[in-house]
Amino acid sequence: MCYNKVKQHIDSIILKGKCKMRKMIIVALSMGSIITMIISAYYIINMYSDHSILYLDPDETDYNKYRIVLISDQLGSASWNELVHGAKFIAENNNTDLNIWGTYRTNQSEIIKQIEIAIASKVDGILVQGINHPDFIEVVNQASIKGIPVITIASDAPSSLRRSYVGVDHYQEGVKIAEYIQKTIESPVNVCFLAGEDFINLQEMRQRGVMDTLNTNEEIKIANPNVFNDTLKSAFQESISLLNENPNCKHIVALNANGASQIVKTIKTRSRIENYKIYAFDDNSEIKELLKDGVIQATIEHHPKEIGVKSMVMMLKWLEGREIPLEKYYYTPSKVITETDL
């Protein structure tokens, strides 16, 4: 009997211990969940609070109030997916129907055709990558005349009747790359530009930013300042011409992503890549890999999600009549990154 009492007492102690342990685990899990929710909320608020997100009134949340089309020729790319994610966040929180249209490669005529379809469909607004070409400008002007606001994103068409531009200041991109070159050169050098056949206006702005900055340095000579005077060809052809015509130029500024990756391939077929310093302006996965390997010295980091957020916010502000007219430019952040930043 004494043995049974002792056993019961021990079992009681063990049971109480298990209960306490169970309570402690439950409390710990609950606290962990609460902390996770707080951290998640903090990051969401921190990411989007600066953009004055528009939330519809409760009695307006049972239907989609606006229909917006977002058009690009970079569908499927990582940076474009980020941009779309940002735009969708705003659309979903404002009961706005956002349609994603576009192509998977540069196709100016197709982009123009899709804008024409959007106009015929009487959408409420168009977000589109700008192309500084007369045909593109004409169709954007048609949309504006019909009362459909157009906001250009990532690249601009400033001579059109678009309402605003949201994206990186490409001139300042050039300034930042040039300042990096100035800080890292060790002796007098020749600098060459490699341009491509797409988005000429964007590349010209980058080049102007680089040249305005480097021209103040007597140790740096621009070998081909008139790169846009001739009709540009494919990145492959342009890279071959550049190396043939400028054999002593070892510092190359690639003004677009295709040019940056192609010049690396071309150099490797005829020389040692270590003899060259290459600078880029894009931060796609291929460019980042080349940066990580030390093949490219520096590039520009963008924030495409912020472009998506800001462009949708400004479109909704226009449609709601809360900000008319819009500012001509809404610039998003960018910075130089190197191998050490990855």
Image (cartoon, rainbow, N blue to C red):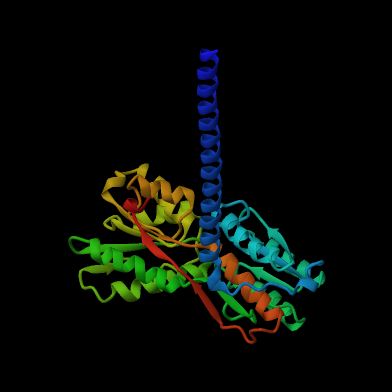
Q: Position of residue 150 (x, y in %)?
A: 67, 75
Q: Position of residue 234 (x, y in %)?
A: 51, 55
Please, which residue is most extreme toward the left here? 187
Please, which residue is most extreme toward the front here? 1
Residue 164 seen: yes
Residue ID at (43%, 66%):
334
Residue 94 in the figure: left or right of residue 30? right
Within the image, what quadrant is residue 259 found in? bottom left
Q: Between 166 and 142, which is closer to the camera in this rendering?
A: 166
Residue 224 seen: no
Determine whether 105 is above or below 94 in the image: above
Within the image, what quadrant is residue 333 found in? bottom left
Q: Between 175 and 39, which is closer to the camera in this rendering?
A: 39
Q: Position of residue 155 (x, y in %)?
A: 55, 69
Determine whether 205 is above or below 302 in the image: below
Q: Position of residue 148 (x, y in %)?
A: 74, 78
Within the image, what quadrant is residue 189 found in? bottom left
Residue 99 in the figure: left or right of residue 128? right
Residue ID at (67%, 80%):
318
**What quarter of the picture does the N terminus occupy?**
top right
Residue 107 in the figure: left or right of residue 172? right
Determine whether 342 is above or below 89 in the image: above
Residue ID at (40%, 51%):
263
